[in-house]
Each structure stands twice: as structure tokens, then as C-alpha cells.
Image (tube, helix red, strand yellow):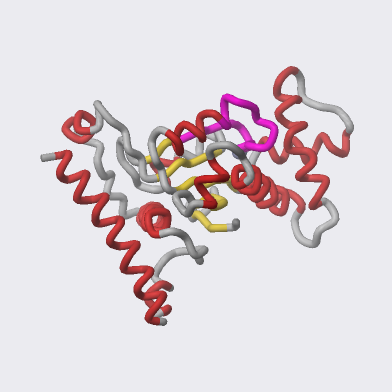
Amino acid sequence: MQRNDRLSRRQFVRSAGAAAAALAVSGRAELRAETPASRPALPLAADAALRDLLEGNERFVAGRLMHPRRSPADFAAVAAVQRPDAIVVGCADARVSPEVLFDQGVGDLFVVRVAGNVVHGAGPIVKGSIEYGVAELGAPLIMVLGHSNCGAVKAAVKHIDAHDLPPGAIGELVRLIEPVVARVRNDPGNLLENAIVANVSTGVERLKSLDPVIAPAVKAGKLAIVGATYDLNTGRVRIVA
Ligand SMILES: [Zn+2]
């Protein structure tokens, strides 16, 4: 029963993506404006997965959570096999929990979280985890998710000027973000906000070029990668890459 519910949901999600594509083709773009953020053109399965995430975030923002697929029957239904709809590469920050802010349930998201949602230079533990979600679990979408007021990016902004680093491996982690800060430090606007977006974009670009698992999947149209930021004040997720 629960497995059927789960399958039905996935089929619904996929058919919703097909409907979105049909609308785009027919030019009824105003209906797409119902979604909370502008979305890039994606393969169907990825588009459906992204739509599902953004609709869940819209419920979170509005305080109308459905808390889907969290009953004992739900988690028993996916005990043997996981088949997540999306991979979320997010920050370890206590306030940015993907299942909560996207209103998703058990088995829906394959989540990789490290401070500063660092991908570039993060090594085989992070990259291998993401690749596993693609190669073994077949997730059609990766979202790199940064957030406002990110402590790891703030530390990179602070220490790049001070020419010192926090102790231990914290310093090594911050050093991975410093090139991103250096790249945007003369851009107009707020340096921290620009660096947070650039850090997300850097992660997206790194994954798109990551052989031998992820880059070929993107080229084959089986996988899409997007970047987004989460606003700690409003709860809203915005697509930025
Ligand atoms: Zn953070």
C-alpha cells in the first residue's frame, strides 16, 4: 500500500514535470509563474524533482507543512531500496535542514552536508557521496544549496583580509572558500552575499565537469545540477545557478 503510494507520488511528480514542459511549449508561461522561483530549463525528471522541492519550500515559507512520508509504514516501505528524487549538497548549519525546508519525507532526499557546502577541493568523501547518489541511486537532480549569513563563507571573508586562519581543519576548510571570495571581492553589492552565491555557482560548475560519473550523466540528459540559496529570515529558497 505504502509502496504504491510512493510510486503514485513519483509518477505524479513526473507527470507534473511533463505538464510543465507542455505548458512551456504551448507558451502558457503565466502558469509557470506560480512557482516560487524562476527555474532553468531541465530534463523532465529533474524538472519534476525541482518543482516538487520548490513547492515544498513554498509550503514551508507559508507555514502549511504537509510532513509527507514520515509514518512507520512510510519508512518501512523504503527500507529495502532507496530511490531519492534529488541529491542536496548543503551546509552543515543547524538552520538549513533540507527535509524540513523542502517539506520532504523519508527516502525523498539524498543529503550531503558539510560546512560551507564546499564541493571544489572537498575530496573523495564529499564527491564520492554525490557520485553514489547519481550512479547507484539514479537521482535525476543535484541541488547545491547555500544560505544567507553562512558562517563558513563569513570566515573566509574575514580571514582573507586578516591573513590568518582558524585552527586545525577549520582553517583548511576556510581556505577552500577563499578563492571564491577573492574572485568577487571587487564586485558591486554586499561581499558576503556575493561570495555565498559564487560559492554555490563554483560547486555547480565543479560538479558539471566532474568525470567520470557526473559530467557524462549531465551530457546525456539524465542529470541536472542547479544551485540555490536559502534565506534564513524568510525560509525561501531561490535558484541562483
Ligand atoms: Zn553555512
Q: Quadrant of ligand 1?
A: top right
Q: Which residues are magenta?
A: 111-127
Query: In this rendering, does residue 149 appear at all?
Result: no
Residue in the picture at 81% in, 27% down: 165
Q: Position of residue 185 (x, y in %)?
A: 82, 51
Please identify the residue farthest to the top as the structure is shown.
168
Q: Is residue 168 left or right of residue 229?
A: right
Does residue 26 appear to the left or right of 7 in the view shown?
right
Q: Position of residue 198 (x, y in %)?
A: 69, 50
Quarter of the picture containing the C terminus is: bottom right
Outermost residue to the bottom: 27
> Which picture quadrant has residue 182?
top right
At 41% from the left and 66% from the top, the residue drawn is 35
Residue 85 in the image, given as x and y percentages of width and height: 36, 45
Residue at the image position 41 percent from the left and 43 percent from the top: 139
Outermost residue toward the left?
Answer: 1
Q: Nearer the viewer, residue 211 or 230?
A: 211
In the picture shown, does residue 149 fall above or below 25? above
Mark yes or no: residue 84 visible: yes
